[in-house]
Image (cartoon, helix red, strand yellow):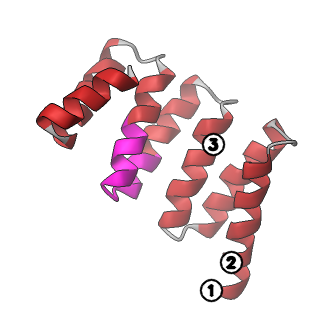
Amino acid sequence: MQSAVNEIEEKDGLDKAQSFLRDKIKDDPAGIDAYLALDSILIREKDYVGAEEILKKALRIAPKNIIVWNNLGAARLRQENYPGAVEAFSRCVKLDPKNRAAWDNLGAVRFQQENYP
């Protein structure tokens, strides 16, 4: 799927790629890859609220997907929603205690919470 998205993005731009992915989600609401690809586009467009909405929908389908939880934490962090980011990164750590990136992200957001109230 990612190669198709990349091709559409190169040829027609981000808006068309986004439309393609939204159609894919409508056609196959259980296809987690489309949610993650759309999240990636929304983050690049700095639409962090939109990314958070898509990721919440993805969690209804895949509540134990650590990539979705991690990306949700990142979207919330970019919105300076520190408690929400902590919640998401903490869920990553609970689901995969050996995931170093999740621990790093959780530490980074806790640092920001303490130093940038």
Evaluate if marks 1 and 2 touch, with contact meaning CB atoms under 8 Å apart. yes
Q: Position of residue 68 (x, y in %)?
A: 58, 38
Graded by Cα atoms within 10 Å as few (under 14), some (14 to 19) or many (20 or more), the crowding at tag 2 reads some
Front residue of 105 and 77: 105
Compared with 73, 28 (above or below) is: above
- Give the side of residue 27 with respect to residue 80, left or right: left
Evaluate if marks 2 and 3 touch, with contact meaning CB atoms under 8 Å apart. no
* Numbered badge on residue 75: none
Q: How many marks?
A: 3
Q: CA distance from mark 1 to mark 3?
A: 23 Å
Evaluate if marks 1 and 3 touch, with contact meaning CB atoms under 8 Å apart. no
- Helix, strand or loop at label 2? It is helix
- Helix, strand or loop at label 1? It is loop
Residue shown at the point (65%, 30%) measured from the top left: 63
Residue shown at the point (51%, 31%) measured from the top left: 58
Q: In this figure, which residue is indicated by the disc labeled 1? A: 116
Compared with 52, 116 (above or below) is: below
* Residue closest to the far right: 97
* Numbered badge on residue 113: 2
Q: What's the residue type where badge 1 is placed?
A: Tyr
Question: Closer to the N terminus: mark 2 or mark 3?
Answer: 3
Graded by Cα atoms within 10 Å as few (under 14), some (14 to 19) or many (20 or more), the crowding at tag 3 reads many
Q: Position of residue 77 (x, y in %)?
A: 56, 64
Asked whether 51 falls inside the magenta stretch, the response is yes
Whether residue 68 is visible, yes or no, is yes
Q: CA distance from mark 1 to mark 2?
A: 6 Å
Residue shown at the point (50%, 55%) measured from the top left: 75
The segment highlighted magenta reads 38-52
Whether residue 19 is visible, yes or no, is no
Q: In this figure, which residue is indicated by the disc labeled 3? A: 69
Quarter of the image for residue 25 reads top left
